[in-house]
Structures are given as structure tokens and as C-alpha cells.
Image (tube, rainbow, N blue to C red):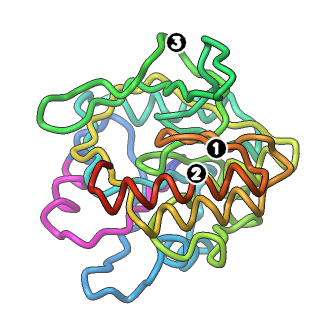
Amino acid sequence: MSLITVVCCYNDRKQYQEFTETLNRQNMTCELIGIDNCNHEFSSCSSALNSVRETVRTKYVIYSHQDIRLPEENMLARFAEYLEQIGTYDILGVAGAVKSPSGDAKGDVCVLSCVRHGNDLVTAGEAEYHGIAECESVDECFFGGTARCFLEKPFDEALCDDWHLYAVERCLSARADGGHVYVCDLPLTHLSGGKINSAYNKGFRRLAYHYRQFPWIRTVCGASRTDWLHRNLFYIKRKLLICLRRI
């Protein structure tokens, strides 16, 4: 029996086929669950991923974007080794957010990642680290943990009712319950860099309110204080930038 199930919700069959080919080249076998959303059956990634959580039979589960590629044949095995090092209710990803080491009072975000983005294979990370490092949240592109964790604590379909921030929400939930969040040094290729839109902006404000026990919410796409004033100022600033097409 395989150790890992990989779950991928896709809306582009060509990209998904290329993703499955990169998995097939790995030197470690895995179960693969593809969720076909080409006909828009699901209105959110949370609902799509929750729809298959009871079918996972392996110890670990990974949730991946369709445009992730594994250029080295041992990458899945390496991620599995890191999964063995974390707790039952911890989360592991490949791109994580921490407070900037400069200690800036504005709470600048530092991204920990070895992922390479786009055609130019630009490295996403902003600081060196090796192995796994603790962080505050991880990106949705490739993350996971124990199947038990996601079975008992499914994705929040009310808070994350679109295609953004569902991994961030799981990270905040894990930390609120005393768990930990980690990022590992896997140099995957991510063909896109993601985009902040109005749905993302609204979702971030909802998260900031729901998890206001944390003074800050830091993601790989930015950070804000969670008090009423700052979360709304952050929302308005982002809204203006989106309207001006500056982000």
C-alpha cells in the first residue's frame, strides 16, 4: 500500500495530464485522486477537496495545484520523509510565511521557499534554510499532512468559499489548536505565481476577523494585523490596488 495520496482539483485537462506524468516519474509510488472541475461542479476548492477526504486510505495526503511539476525523481520521497517528522495535526508545505528577520515594526513578511516559478524559474524564497523550518502559514500550491488530520478537521467551506486561502485557514486552525506549521526545502516547479483578486481580498478579511486571536496573519502574499482598524485598512488598500491593476 502506498504511503501518500495526492489530491488535485483541476480545470485544465492538459495541465493535469502533465502533472500526472511528473508523478509517474517519481521513484516512490502514490495514490492519485483527481477532481475534475472542468464543468464547474464545485464552487470552491474547500468543497472539492472535502468531497474526497473519506476516500483517502493512506497515512498521508498531499493537496496540489495542477500546474506543479516535480523535476527530480526523488521529490515525492523527500516530502514523505519530511511528513514523517511532523505531528499528527501539523501542516507541511513548500512555501511558507514568517515575520521578516529584520524585525520591522510593520510586520513585513519573509517567504521561505525553494519553489521555482514560471518560465524563468524564479526562486520564490527570500531567506536561506535547510530541511524543514517552522512558519506561520503555507501556500496552497503543494501542502499536506496526515490523512487523519484532514479527515477530522476538514477544509472550512464557509470561511473559504472560493479558490483562495484554504491552506492558510488550515494552518491558522492548526496553530489555534496547539499544532505547528512547517515549510520544507523542496525545489518544485510552479508554472504560475498566483494572483490576488477581489475574492482573495474578501477572504483574507474574513480570516483576519475569524482568527483575530492572532495579532497578525502572515501569508506568502502579504500580512496584516487582525484588529478591526488594520484588517479593514488592509482590505481597502488591496481593493484600490486591484482596481488600479497594480497587483
Q: Nearer the viewer, mark 1 or mark 3?
A: 1
* Of 130 and 199, the residue lying toward us: 199
Q: Position of residue 84 (x, y in %)?
A: 65, 32
Query: Is 75 situated above or below 195?
Result: above
Mark 3 and mark 2 lie on one chain; the one further toward the N terminus is: 3
The numbered mark at residue 129 is 3
Query: Is 65 situated above or below 52?
Result: above
Residue under pointer 2: 234
Residue 148 shown left or right of residue 130 in the figure: right
Query: Is 39 situated above or below 239?
Result: below
Query: Is 87 situated above or below 199?
Result: above
Q: Is residue 10 magenta?
A: yes
Q: Position of residue 177 (x, y in %)?
A: 87, 49
Q: CA distance from mark 2 to mark 1?
A: 6 Å
Sort mark 2 into few (<14), some (14-19) or many (20+) by Cα contacts within 10 Å.
some
Q: Residue at x 28, y 41 (%)?
A: 190
Is disc 2 in contact with disc 1, using a CB cutoff of under 8 Å? yes
Q: Residue at x 64, y 28 (%)?
A: 106
Q: Residue at x 18, y 59 (%)?
A: 15
Residue under pointer 1: 224
Q: CA distance from mark 1 to mark 3?
A: 24 Å
Is disc 3 in contact with disc 2, using a CB cutoff of under 8 Å? no
